[in-house]
Amino acid sequence: MLAPTNVLSLYRINPDGEDDWRFRSAHPPNGMGPGDMAFGGSTLALAIHAAYHTLPQDRALNMRIYSVLGHFHGLTKSTIPLEIAVKSLRDTRSFATRQVTVQQALPPDTRKPRTTCVLLIDFIAKAGSRTLIAFSEAPLDKNITHHSKLDDLNEALEKEVKAGTTDPMFVRILSSYHALNHDLWHNRYCPEGVIGQISVGAKVERPTNQDTLPFAQRRSYDWLKSRHDLPEQSTPANRDQVLLPPHRSAASAAMFAHFLDTWMSVIVPWWAHMDARHAQVFATLDFALRFHVDDLDASAWHLRQHTAMAAGDERNYAQANLYREEAGKDHTLVATMTQTCALKGFERKAAKL
């Protein structure tokens, strides 16, 4: 089973940098099914991890991530490690801002790495006692099936195959895309949402109880929790050692970014019962990830809600909300991820005259 340490590990390749730090991923980014296309969430996770290692040591434990904005500039391959350059744009008592450029040295000319992603990552000093107002938006649906009553995704799909309701071939294809999340997360899809009702894309043509709703009112829900315990604090690495996230909140931020990128580019076509047979391009163009609480813990149960707000002109806009489960309380909104994604059909051949 693949642990977060394998997914998030980095090498520092210029440890003496002041305003410009460089890192290399200890492994190539995670793949996304057949072929050598890398999963975008892996890029985000590694970029966030690198940014944490550039915070001033005397304030690092007091800084909390709150904003990750960026664009994908091209295809990332799952066969080549990432080169990550971090530049400081701001360091004050209250804020730290980092510009992160992710590149890959692609053959034949590895001397000119290609930029695949550029991010702006902001940290803020941990909140003190001056909070004036505190509230949180709740999930759109009130009666979501609790994770204790659901199976993990792989177990749920195995039951569907045995019951004859889902084609095992589609499950194998889906598993090739979702294999990493199987290793990292307990992930349980709720029957109240579209994605759960279409077996996470394995039965995209299956009718759902939301088909009569406008697209902007459809939603999906799933629960997630890390399969691995995350240490409160990691041991600092020496010059030639692998770097791990410095503490639990840092590891959780990177892991949540990794997970929240999942399915964002296919939500809208799935809402319309479409998949790769109907569209040629599903690809994230830009993203905005915001954390709304200081302390993050991926080893606790969280609920994700997917919605989609707009589509047209060969692109769409979707959102994932992440809520923390709290005993005896309403769910607390922990993070929001929004993305603009390219969505293009197949080219139509010109009619013969």
Image (cartoon, grey):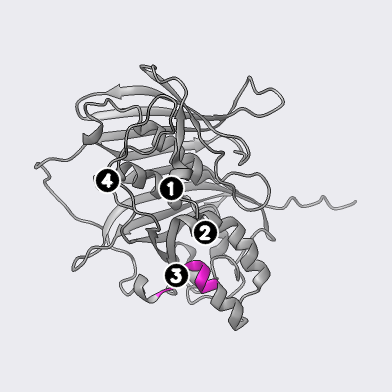
Give the spatial CA distance, label 2 vs label 4.
34 Å
**Is 210 or 148 nearer to us in this picture?**
148
**What element does badge 4 sit on?**
loop
190 on left or right of 112: left
Total numbered badges shown on the rendered structure: 4
Please give the residue where the numbered disc 3 appears in the rendered image.
193
Q: Quadrant of residue 9?
A: top left
Give the spatial CA distance, label 3 vs label 4.
34 Å
Residue visible at 34% across and 66% down in the picture: 140
44 on left or right of 330: right
Question: Is mark 2 in CB contact (under 8 Å) with mark 4?
Answer: no
User: Magenta residues, as a range?
Assistant: 150-157
Residue visible at 46% across and 57% down in the picture: 308
Please give the residue where the numbered disc 4 appears in the rendered image.
232
Please give the residue where the numbered disc 1 appears in the rendered image.
4
**What element does badge 1 sit on?**
helix
- Disc 3 or 4, which lies upstream in sequence? 3
Asked whether residue 165 appears in the rendered view, the answer is no
Amino acid found under the numbered disc labelled 1:
Pro
56 on left or right of 289: left
Amino acid found under the numbered disc labelled 3:
Gly
Q: Quadrant of residue 173?
A: bottom right
Give the spatial CA distance, label 3 vs label 1.
28 Å
- Disc 2 or 1, which lies upstream in sequence? 1
